[in-house]
């Protein structure tokens, strides 16, 4: 049987099984998943940021549940979204949803939902990558007027909407009419400024002061981008109200990864030669290849019928948990192979066993334990080129400045074993023919991953 036939058969069987066994609570009238590309959790007001960047997202968090410690499965879009759409952990980077696996929209289609996607990111709307499968309507843009129209025209039918906006992605800063923080002097967060001050006098970083204006302006632009996308979220929430399904809707706010914003130095093996060394050339501006918290700690907010408003869940969760959670809302069984865990018990306030979080890139894998220990482990390839393990106690060192790997070899060994166990359960590496296609290369260049 061809891969498409296999996926369809799986979805039909799941729908039939769910129907024969009884679904329990009524399925939600509308499910809206809003993915805000490149969004750090700690830049939202409801996550403690001292600027009002996200009043409408904050209001949604007050009406639902905010997960304080959500982790992305990669620090760049393609593997992170493959993991989110399939509910699986990966053992290696992938561009595409596997042909023989059902993904998020296909499950909704099997349950009788109209499915629509509005996607700005070219890696997601490249049809080679499989993210379009299962959508009745797929638009390679994120025009909020069209999205709102799609929602309000649902006509009472069950509808699943996926929105993927990229406003916080570089280059930072919206159009002039939407600028607010950019009209102010540049501002560098205090923790980063203290770190930069510790580098003063080191010749490899050049004249630090000469970089601060550009870095501060970028932070302001990033905050303005968040402020703009927050206003778009408000438009979609009002569209749900106009459609009369707001109270019956499941709403998810998530992100595929965060952003570096010069918080950590680039790995030496990926440094590009520069005529003049500086913070701007030696530190990670964007994302990918590293797994520090500014790249992995992402927002996750879920509002749904029957969910206690305003609760904050401190337990560690992952983006791979989103799909199994939505399957629980549908009353559909979780297929074999999904490694994420449903968050429905946590949404209901039920106690659960502590969880670990796992992430990967081409160069490193990581695990973060429930008690705050984190290991960043080089792959065999990158270790042969000089990368070394990094061990952090996030409880005492949330900015990941003090590498304890040499001091605590037993912890490195223990956490290495956790990573190895997860990799054994994870989706196998992509076949060799899943190489970087011309269209994916163009998308990577458009997003700044490839120069």
Image: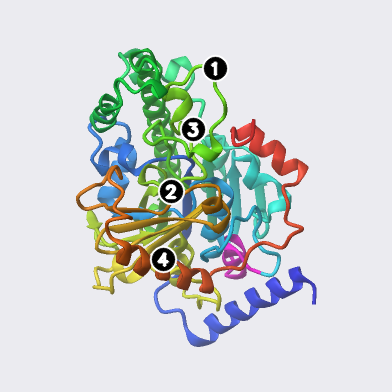
Of 370 and 128, which appears nearest the observer? 370
* Callout in the foreground (4, 2): 4
Residue 376 numbered mark, or none: none
Element on which disc 3 rests:
loop
The residue that label 4 is drawn on is: 416
* Callout 4–callout 1 Cβ contact below 8 Å: no
Question: Whole-Å distance between the Cαs marked 4 and 2?
Answer: 15 Å
Residue 291 numbered mark, or none: 2
Q: Is residue 179 visible?
A: yes
Q: In the rendering, at what x and y percent does residue 402 appear?
A: 27, 45
Q: Residue at x 63, y 74 (%)?
A: 11
N-terminal of the two: label 3 or label 1?
3
Residue 167 numbered mark, or none: 3
* Callout in the foreground (3, 1): 1
Element on which disc 1 rests:
loop
N-terminal of the two: label 4 or label 2?
2
Q: Is 431 within the magenta?
A: no
Question: Whole-Å distance between the Cαs marked 1 and 2?
Answer: 28 Å
Q: Is residue 343 visible?
A: no
In the picture, residue 440 is in which quadrant? top right
* Quadrant position of the C terminus in the picture: top right
The residue that label 1 is drawn on is: 275
């Amino acid at each position: 049987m061809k891969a498409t036939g296999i996926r369809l058969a799986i979805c039909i069987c799941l729908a039939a099984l769910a129907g024969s066994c009884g679904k329990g609570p009524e399925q939600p009238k509308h499910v809206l998943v809003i993915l805000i590309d490149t969004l750090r959790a700690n830049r939202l007001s409801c996550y403690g940021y001292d600027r009002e960047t996200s009043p409408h997202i904050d209001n949604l968090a007050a009406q639902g549940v905010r997960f304080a410690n959500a982790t992305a499965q990669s620090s760049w879009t393609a593997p992170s979204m493959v993991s989110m759409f399939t509910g699986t952990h990966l053992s290696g980077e992938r561009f595409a949803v596997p042909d023989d696996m059902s993904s998020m929209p296909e499950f909704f289609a099997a349950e009788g939902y109209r499915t629509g996607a509005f996607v700005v990111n070219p890696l997601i709307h490249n049809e080679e990558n499989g993210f379009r499968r299962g959508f009745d309507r797929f638009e390679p843009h994120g025009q909020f007027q069209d999205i709102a129209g799609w929602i309000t025209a649902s006509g009472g039918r069950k509808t699943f909407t996926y929105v993927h906006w990229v406003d916080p992605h570089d280059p930072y800063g919206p159009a002039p009419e939407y600028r607010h923080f950019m009209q102010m002097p540049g501002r560098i967060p205090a923790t980063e400024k203290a770190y930069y001050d510790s580098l003063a006098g080191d010749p490899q970083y050049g004249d630090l002061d000469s970089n601060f204006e550009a870095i501060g302006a970028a932070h302001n632009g990033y905050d303005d981008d968040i402020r703009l996308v927050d206003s778009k979220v408000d438009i979609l929430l009002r569209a749900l109200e106009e459609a009369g399904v707001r109270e019956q809707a499941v709403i998810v706010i998530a992100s595929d990864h965060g952003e570096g914003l010069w918080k950590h130095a680039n790995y030496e093996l990926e440094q590009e030669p520069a005529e003049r060394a500086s913070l701007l050339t030696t530190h990670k501006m964007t994302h990918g290849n590293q797994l520090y918290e500014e790249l992995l700690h992402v927002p996750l907010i879920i509002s749904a019928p029957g969910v206690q408003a305003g609760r904050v869940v401190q337990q560690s969760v992952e983006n791979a948990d989103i799909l199994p959670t939505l399957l629980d809302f549908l009353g559909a069984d979780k297929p074999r192979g999904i490694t994420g865990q449903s968050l429905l018990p946590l949404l209901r306030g039920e106690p659960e066993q502590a969880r670990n979080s796992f992430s990967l890139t081409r160069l490193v894998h990581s695990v973060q334990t429930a008690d705050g220990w984190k290991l960043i482990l080089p792959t065999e390839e990158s270790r042969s080129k000089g990368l070394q393990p990094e061990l952090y106690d996030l409880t005492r060192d949330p900015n990941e400045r003090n590498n304890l790997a040499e001091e605590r070899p037993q912890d490195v060994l223990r956490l290495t074993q956790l990573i190895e166990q997860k990799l054994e359960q994870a989706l196998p590496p992509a076949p060799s023919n899943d190489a970087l296609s011309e269209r994916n290369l163009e998308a990577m260049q458009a997003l700044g991953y490839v120069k």
